[in-house]
Image: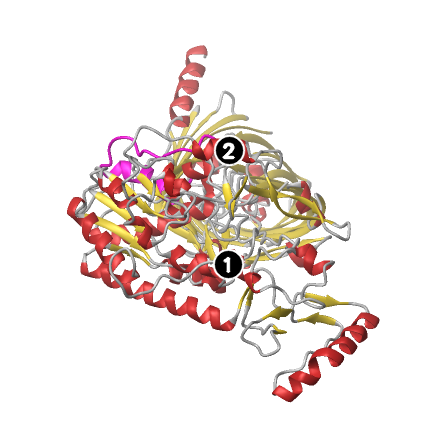
Amino acid sequence: MKIKISIIALALTGMWACQPELNEFTPSKGNADFTTYMSAGNSLTAGYSDGALYKSGQQNSYAAILAKQLESVGRTGEFKIPYIETEDGVGFRGAAMFTKLKMGYSVDCKGVASLSPVFANTEATQQELGGFIGTPVSGGPFNNVGVPGAKVTHLLAPHYGDPAGLQTGTANPYFVRFASSTTTSVLDDALAVNPTFFSLWIGNNDVLGYATSGGVGDVITPVEGNPGFGFEASYGYIVQLLKTKASAGVVANIPDITSIPFFTTVPYNAIVLTDQAQVEALNAAYDAHYNGAAEQLGLPKIIWSLGQNPMVIADASNPLTMRQITSDELVLLTIPQDSLKCGGWGTQKPVPNQFVLTATEKEYVSNAVIAYNGIISSVAEANDLAFVDANAYMKEASTTGIKVDGVTFSNAFVRGNLFSTDGVHLTPQGNALVANLFIDAINAEYSASIPKVNVNEYNAVLLP
Amino acid sequence: MTKSLIFSLLFAVAGMSVFAGGYQVRLQGNKSTGMGLTGTALNLGSSSIFYNPGALSLMKNKTDFSIGASGILSRITFEKSGSQYQAETDNPMSTPLYVYGAGKISDKWTVGLGVYTPFGSSTQWDNNWAGKFLIQNISLKAIYVQPTVAYKINDKLGVGAGFVYAHGTVKLAKGLNYGAGTGVELEGTSSNMGFNVGVFYTPTEKLSLGVDYRSKILAEVKGGDATFTIPQSVQNTIPAQNKFDATLPMPGNLDFGVSYQASEKMLVSFEVNWVMWSAYDTLKFEFEEKGEILNSSNPRKYKDTFIPRLGFEYKLNDMITLRAGGYYDQSPTDDDYFNPETVSLNTLAFTLGMSINPTEKLSIDLSYLQLTGQKTEKTYSPEEFGGTYKSAAYIPGIGVSYHF
C-alpha cells in the first residue's frame, strides 16, 4: 500500500509539472539589420516626462523600450543612454530650472485643496539642479541621441553642444551634457554610433515651441530654406546622412496639437459665474467701457451670464486689443489658475496672449503640421523607411480613445493614461504603446517579426 | 483639472477555468467519471440523484450510499498576440465532492438526498500579468443540496424529480491602472433554487434510455463586498468599500443517454448533453454607491453546446470492474468575447476508472480524467486583449459506495 501511495504521489507530481507549452511567435529580423540601433529625436525620444528629464524617464523612453525588444532580432551591445543622475529631474521654464512634476495637492487662492501637478521637490536649488544637468556624461557615443527641445534644424547645428552657446541660445543644455565635442552636431554624434538601424522622431518642437508659448515665444520653422534653416531640406538631409550608415530605419510624424492635453484641458469657457450681482457688475462695466465701442466697430459685444462664460483675452490684432475667446481657440495648460480664480483674469483683465492659441495662431500651427507630415511621409517612402503615423494614432486616441489590454488611452489630462503630468510628454505606459506602434511599422516595412512589449508592465500617471 | 478619475470597470465573472463547458463540472460520481462522465442512462445507484433521478426508482438495491471526491490539477498557458510574452496560471488544486444517500420506502417510491459541488475551482493568474485589468484571480464554489423523490411506474419505466438548493460563493480580483498593488476585490454569496427531473426507461434487459433536465439557476449575488485598493486621492470619487449585485447563470442541461449491455461483461454508454449556455449573454455589475461610474455591462455571448460522450465498463471479475471513456467538449465562448476569467477551450477528454469490490456490498471507485484544451487564439474585444491559450487538467478521483 505504501508503494502504491508513493507511485500515485509521483504520478501526481509529474502531472502537476505538465504545463501546456506554447510557441506561437518566432522573432525575425526580416530584411533589416538591427545590430546597432540609434534613436535620434527630441524630448519624446530622450524620455523626457513630467516636465523634466530624469533617469527612470530615460529608461522608459519608447526608444529604450524598442531597443530592448530589438534584442531578439539581432541587436547586440549596450543601448547607451546619457543618463542624468537624478530621479527628481531637471526641466526649464525660461532660464529657471525646476524638478519634475508629480500629482499632489495644492491649495488655491480660495483655500481649496485639489489634486494637481506639483513639483516633486520644491527644496531643490538652482545650483543643485544646475549640477545635475551641468555634469558632462562620458562613455559615448550614445545610442539614444534624443535632445529635449531640439528642432529639425538643431540636429544639423554645429556647436549645439557647446557650453559657450548656452547664454546666446545657440546651444542646448541637454545636448551640452553628452556632446562628444564643442563643435559637434547632434547628427554627427548620432552617426558616430555607426548605426545599422535608426529611428527618427523629430519636428514636434518646430511647431510646439511656438504653440506652447501661445504664439509669442518662438517661431515656426519655415518649410522652405536650406538645410539647417528650412524643414524640408533639413529633414531630407538628415535622413540622407543617416542612410549613409544605416540601411534601414523608422520615422514618425507629428501629432496635431489638438490631440495633446496641454492644449485641450482648460476649456475656453472656464469662467464660471455663480453670483448674479457679479454678472450685473461685469455687464455694467463692459457696457460702459467696451460694448459701445464694439458696436460702433461692428465687433461682438461682451455679455456675461450665470454659468460658463468664454474668457476675455488680449488680442493685439483686435482694434479694442481684447475680446472674448471663441470656442475653437485653445487655452494652454500653464495658465495660472489662481489668476483665473482670484486675479480677475478672463473677466476684469484679459488673459495674456502667451496663454492662448488664437484661431489664427492655431491655423499657422496646423498648416505647419500638415506640411511637415507631408514631408516626413514622402521622405519615408522615397527612402524605403518604416513610417509611424503618430498623428493618426493620437487623433484616434483623442477622439474615440484607444483600448489596449484593458486600458483606455486618450488625451484626457492625467486620467487618459497616455500623457504625463506636463500634458505634452508620454507616460511610461504611453511610451510602451508608442514602442509597439514603431514595432508594427517596422514589421510591416521590413517583413520582420519584432515581438511587442507588454504595455501593462508600465505605469500611467501615479496618484497620491 | 478634473478631479473625477473615471475608469471603466469591466468585471470578470466566476469561472471554471479548465473545462470547456464554461464553468460546469460534472464530477458527480466516480463510476460515471470513469465512463466519459456519462450517467443519464446508467443505473448507478444513489449517484443517479444527480445524473438522472428517474433511474433512482429502478435502483437495484434497497439502500445505497455513495461518497467521493476529485482533485482538479489544472494548468493554463497564455501567449500574447504578436509577442513572446507568456503567462501561466498557478491554480490551487480544487476538490469537488459528493455525498448521496437513497432508499426505497415502498415498492414504487424511492427517496434520496444529494449534496454535491457542480462548481468549484479557481484560476490564479499572476497579479501583474498582462491581463491583470481583466482578471487576476477568481474562485468559485457552489454547493448543491438536492432532496429527491423517484417513482417507479412499472419495472421498465421510472421518473424522478429533485429540488435543488444552490449556495454559491464567488471571490475575484482584478487590477486597476493606478500602479502596483491597486485593484478591486469582489466577494459575495448567493442562494438560489432550481430542480432536476429525469425519466429512465429500460425497454429490454440490455437496453436503457434516459432523459434528464437540470434547470438553469441564476446565482444572484446581492450586497456582495467590493473592496477597492486605490490611491487616497481617488477615494474622493470611488469609495474604498462598496456593495455590489451581480448575477451569474448556471445554465440548464438537457441530457439524452442510451446504454447497452453488449455482453455479460461489457456495458456501453452513450449520451449527448445539451448545455444551454446562451443564457450567459451579459454579465452585469451594479454598485450601491457611485453606480453611475462603476456599473458595468459586460458581453459574454456564450452559445449552447452539445457534448457527445462515450463510456465503457468491463466487469473483469467479481472483485474488479474497469472503465474507460471520452468526450469532446466544445467551448461555449465567442471568439471575440473570450475573457481569461474563464479559459474555456475546445477540449478533448479521456477517462479511466476502476472499481474494487472487497465485499459484495462495498465498492471503492477510482477514476482518472485528463483534459486537453486545444490551442486557440482568442480575443476579448471590449478590452482589446487577445492571445493564444492552451490548457490541460488532470483529475484523479476516489469514491466509496455501499449498499444493502
Q: Is residue B376 left or right of residue A384?
A: right
- Residue A206 placement, left or right of B273: left
Q: Which mark is residue A213?
A: 1
Assign a secondary structure to mark 2. loop
- The amino acid beneath tag 1 is Ser
Residue at 61% of width from left, 86% of height from top?
A: A297
Q: Nearer the viewer, residue A446 or B75?
A: A446
According to the image, label 2 marks what residue? A87
Q: Quick one: quadrant of the N terminus of chain A?
A: top left
Q: Tell me: residue A195, above or below residue A434.
A: above
Residue B5, above or below A357: above
Q: For the C terminus of chain A, which image quadrant?
A: top right
Q: Residue at x 57, y 71 (%)?
A: A315
Q: Chain of mark 2?
A: A
The reply to whether discs 1 and 2 touch (Cβ–Cβ < 8 Å) is: no
Task: Please name the colour scheme applied to the rendered image.
Answer: secondary structure
Disc 1 element: loop
Span of residues in magenta:
A60-86
Instruction: Report the chain holding disc 1.
Output: A
Q: Residue B80's spot in the image, x, y percent?
A: 38, 44
